[in-house]
Image (cartoon, rainbow, N blue to C red):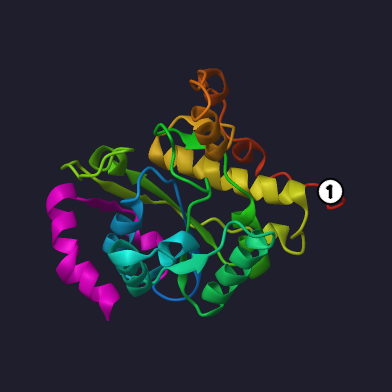
C-alpha cells in the first residue's frame, strides 16, 4: 500500500512538478513476468523517477545501511525503503556477492521486475563506468531478459553533494530487451560474464549518450579521496568491449 501511496500521493506529484519527466520506450517493459531493468546511475533520484514512470512495481537491491540506522533518521530510512519495496543487501561480508545473487533470483522467481545499477555505485562525474558482472551472473542463472534503462537529468536535479533538489528536465529512456539465451549453460564462465555485462553497458552508452570509461566508478571514488583524479578521456574514447564482441561465442573453457 505504501508503495502506491508514495508514488501517486506523497512524493509523485512533487517529482512530476520538479522534473517534468519524459518517458520513452515504455512498451519495451513486459506487462507481466520477470525482467531485469539495468540502469545507469547518476543520482539517488534514479531510484525515485524510474518507479514513478514504470507502471509495474520495481524491486531494487539496496545496501543494508539504509535499514540499520538509529534515531529518527535511521527509523525513517528503514520505514521508507521497506515501504517502497527495497530489499536490504549486506555488501561487506565475505558472501555479499552470493547473497545479492540469491536475493535477485528470489525476486525474479516471483515474476517481478528487478532494478539493478551495473556500475555498482553512482557515477562520480556524470560519465558511464565499467559494469560489474553480478548482473551477468543473475541474467545467466535466471534466463530472464535484461532491459537497459537510461536516466537523464537526475544529476542536474540532484547534483553530487547537494542536499536540496533543484528543478531540471528528467528523461527516462527504456531500450529494447536483450536476450542472452545464446549463452545458456555458460554461467560461471568469466569471459561470458564480462561479455554479457559489456553488451549491456554498450546499450546504456547508446541510450544515455554518456561518455564511457573502462574502469570501475568505485575505483575513481576511492582515488578521489587520496588525490585529484587524473583525466580519463583517453580511455573514454573507446566504447565498452561488450558492444563489438557481443555476438562472439567464447570458448566455454575460458576461466
Q: In the picture provided, is 54 more to the left or to the right than 215?
A: left
Magenta-tinted stretch: 1-30
Task: Place residue 13 in its image quadrant.
Answer: bottom left
Q: Which residue is drawn at 68% across and 63% down?
A: 95
Marker count (numbered): 1
For the stretch drawn in magenta, the main secondary structure is helix
Q: Which residue is drawn at 64% across and 60% down?
A: 93
Q: In the picture provided, is 46 more to the left or to the right than 34?
A: left
* Foreground pick, 252 / 194: 194
* Residue wearing tag 1: 255
For residue 19: magenta? Answer: yes
Q: In the picture provided, is 48 more to the left or to the right than 99?
A: left
* Foreground pick, 120 / 184: 120
Q: Which residue is drawn at 39% across and 40% down?
A: 208
**Residue 193 in the image: x percent, y percent?**
69, 51
Residue 249 seen by the camera: no
Q: Residue at x 59, y 64 (%)?
A: 100
Amino acid at each position: 500500500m505504501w508503495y502506491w501511496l508514495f508514488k501517486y500521493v506523497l512524493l509523485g506529484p512533487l517529482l512530476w512538478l520538479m522534473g517534468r519527466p519524459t518517458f520513452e520506450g515504455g512498451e519495451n517493459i513486459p506487462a507481466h513476468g520477470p525482467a531485469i531493468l539495468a540502469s545507469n546511475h547518476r543520482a539517488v533520484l534514479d531510484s525515485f523517477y524510474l518507479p514513478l514512470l514504470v507502471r509495474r512495481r520495481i524491486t531494487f537491491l539496496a545496501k543494508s545501511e539504509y535499514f540499520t540506522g538509529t534515531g529518527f533518521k535511521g527509523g525513517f530510512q528503514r520505514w521508507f525503503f521497506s515501504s517502497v519495496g527495497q530489499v536490504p543487501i549486506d555488501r561487506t561480508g565475505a558472501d555479499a556477492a552470493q547473497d545479492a545473487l540469491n536475493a535477485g533470483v528470489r525476486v525474479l522467481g516471483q515474476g517481478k521486475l528487478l532494478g539493478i545499477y551495473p556500475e555498482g555505485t553512482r557515477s562520480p562525474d556524470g560519465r558511464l563506468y565499467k559494469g560489474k558482472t553480478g548482473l551477468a551472473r543473475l541474467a545467466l542463472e535466471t534466463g530472464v531478459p535484461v532491459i537497459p534503462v537510461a536516466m537523464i537529468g537526475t544529476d542536474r536535479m540532484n547534483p553530487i553533494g547537494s542536499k536540496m533538489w533543484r528543478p531540471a528536465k528528467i528523461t527516462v529512456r527504456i531500450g529494447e530487451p536483450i536476450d542472452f539465451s545464446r549463452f545458456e549453460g555458460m554461467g560461471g564462465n568469466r569471459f561470458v560474464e564480462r561479455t554479457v555485462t559489456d553488451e549491456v553497458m554498450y546499450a546504456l552508452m547508446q541510450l544515455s549518450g554518456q561518455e564511457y570509461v573502462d574502469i570501475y566508478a568505485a575505483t575513481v571514488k576511492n582515488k578521489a579521496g587520496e588525490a585529484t583524479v587524473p583525466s580519463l578521456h583517453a580511455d573514454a574514447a573507446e566504447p565498452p568491449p561488450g558492444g563489438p564482441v557481443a555476438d562472439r561465442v567464447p570458448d566455454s573453457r575460458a576461466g
